[in-house]
Image (cartoon, rainbow, N blue to C red):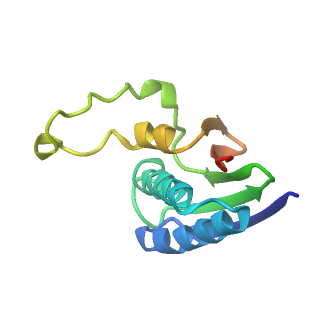
């Protein structure tokens, strides 16, 4: 079984709820449990927020193309934008705060995406833009 579907969303923060609905429905169809679905939703939300804020430099500067692929083993979500190129190797590993009260925020998104998802892959080409592919596999009993 392989099911794929694509939707294009405006690069706006108010699109995040619609993107979340889209990936939650895909996760349910893929048979992910609640914990896996929540991890997927958090990772996609963080990635889309980063696209709006960093790739586009603000709202209404572009679109976010969201494609999912449901397989027998889980769900893959691909996010594409045409904003500034992103090189994940240029992002240093974060220093984890020992006290959340002193955490200044920012810089942890890539770290969290990698922790929440089973696979995270970035690529950029001038013709294809930034493509982030994240996979969440179903846990087997």
Give above or below for 98 relative to 62: above
| Image height of 6 relative to 111, above or below | below
> Which quarter of the figure has residue 120?
top right
Q: Is residue 24 left or right of residue 43?
A: right
> How far from the left and from the top, in percent, is residue 53?
39, 54
- Residue 10 pos. (x, y %): 55, 70
In front of the other: 77 or 10: 77
Q: Position of residue 40 (x, y in %)?
A: 54, 55
The structure residue drawn at horizontal position 70% and vertical position 59%, both measured from the top left corner, is: 67
Determine the image quadrant of residue 93: top left
Q: Residue at x 55, y 60 (%)?
A: 37
Question: Which residue is located at x 65 percent, y 60 percent?
Answer: 66
Q: Does residue 120 appear to the left or right of 74 in the view shown? A: left
Please indicate whether residue 92 sits to the left or right of residue 104 in the image. right
Horizontal relation, residue 6 to residue 9: left or right: right
Query: Which residue occupies the foreground of this view, 116 or 141?
Result: 141
In-front residue for pair 128/39 = 39
* Residue at (54, 49) in percent of width and height: 83
Residue lying furthest front = 141
Residue placed most toward the observer, 36 or 105? 36
Quick one: quadrant of the N terminus?
bottom right
Q: How many marks?
A: 0
The residue positioned farthest toward the right in the image shown: 1
């Amino acid at each position: 079984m392989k099911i794929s579907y694509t939707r294009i969303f405006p690069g706006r923060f108010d699109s995040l709820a619609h993107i979340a609905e889209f990936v939650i429905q895909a996760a349910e169809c893929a048979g992910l449990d609640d914990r896996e679905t929540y991890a997927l939703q958090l990772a996609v939300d963080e990635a889309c927020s980063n696209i709006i804020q960093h790739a586009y430099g603000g709202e209404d500067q572009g679109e976010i193309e969201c494609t999912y692929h449901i397989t027998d083993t889980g769900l893959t979500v691909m996010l594409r934008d045409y904003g500034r190129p992103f090189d994940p190797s240029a992002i240093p590993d974060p220093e984890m705060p020992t006290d959340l009260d002193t955490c200044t925020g920012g810089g942890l998104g890539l770290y969290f995406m990698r922790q929440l998802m089973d696979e995270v892959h970035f690529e950029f080409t001038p013709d294809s833009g930034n493509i982030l592919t994240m996979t969440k596999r179903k846990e087997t009993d």
